[in-house]
Image: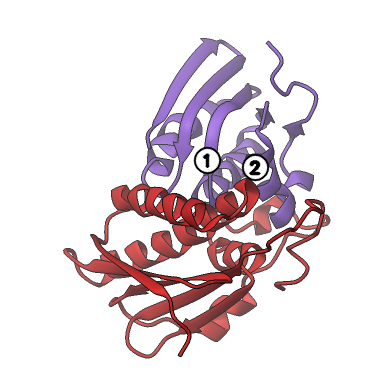
Chain colours: A purple, B red
Amino acid sequence: MDLNIEVNDQGLSQSIKLAGEIDAYTAPKLKEALLPLVKKENVTVVVDLEHVNYMDSTGLGVFISALKATKEYDSELRLVSLQDRVRRLFEITGLENIINIDSTVRGGK
Amino acid sequence: MESFDFIEMKVPAKPEYVGVVRLSTSGIANRMGFSYEEIEDLKVAISEAMSNATTHAYEDKEGGEVTVGFGLYEDRLEVMVADRGESFDLKRIKSEIGPYKNNQSVEDLREGGFGLFLIEALMDKVEIKNDYGVIVLMTKYLRENEVDINDDQISTTL
């Protein structure tokens, strides 16, 4: 019932690997790690959700704040390797059309 | 009188206990014979209600509690989540929820507020009482012998 966050800093291309559950308890921790990454000019941040087996609206809220920051800093946010259950939340809420979700990388290594 | 088993939990109104209630929900739903997909729906819906309740209770005063009641019926699971925080303007909240439209600009996006929308999308029936604190009552029916997993459960609940 925790969330592991691993940040890989490669200058303008940042990746962040998540493992565990994103809920009311862990979302603040994610927000704290993700927002500083997207708040850099021209940076691309790839969020790997392959090992996230649970997420609810608290997680959606974090990704929305990150997306808003990208508009401000001209940076880019991409979500990759979503499990079906997590992807479904983006579909139900209509966020799949607004957030850049990579459908091809699922499970790809 | 319809017979049913009842399970009640009382947890501190803190985010770290949302996961505890989610695990209990998963165990109860599994025991009742819900499918994997349905259990995942229940986990999200009940976590959303719990997140709301912990926020309300937290705003009100620290040290609050959230009461969760599970009614296990032959054909359905009823889950009640109650907090004793301040009541809220339900009409206003209802008017603010819903899926995003394609043409919505990023600046207009809300960071919160999909909790109730997701609960309504994932459960079969949702009732909210708002007199003293907030009580969310959610129902999910057991679909026995349901073979069509493509059955769109979302459309039936909206």
Mark found first going from the N terminus, 2 or 1:
1
Query: With respect to residue B25, does B78 lie above or below?
Result: below
Name the residue at the left extreme.
B63
| Quarter of the image that includes the C terminus of chain B | bottom right
Residue A101 placement (x, y as % from top left):
73, 34
Residue B26 placement (x, y as % from top left):
46, 50
Q: Amino acid at mark 1?
A: Tyr
Q: Is residue A79 left or right of residue B151?
A: left
Pointer 1 indicates a residue of which chain? A
Residue on which disc 2 sits: A85
Q: Residues within 10 Å of mark 1 (few under 14, many from 20)?
A: many
Give the residue drawn at x 48%, y 85%: B2
Give the residue drawn at x 53%, y 60%: B45
Q: Dots 2 and 1: beta carbons under 8 Å?
A: yes
As rendered, which of A21 and A59 lies closer to the eye? A21
Residue B109 placement (x, y as % from top left):
65, 56
- Distance of label 2 from label 1 (alpha carbons): 8 Å
Q: Amino acid at mark 2?
A: Arg
Residue on which disc 1 sits: A54
Residue A32 placement (x, y as % from top left):
40, 35
Give the residue drawn at x 68%, y 27%: A80
Mark 2 on the same chain as mark 1? yes
Give the residue drawn at x 64%, y 71%: B124
Query: With respect to residue B136, does A21 lie above or below?
Result: above
As rendered, which of B99 and B141 lies closer to the eye? B141
As rendered, which of A108 and A66 lies closer to the eye? A108
Pointer 2 indicates a residue of which chain? A
Q: Is residue A93 left or right of residue B89?
A: right
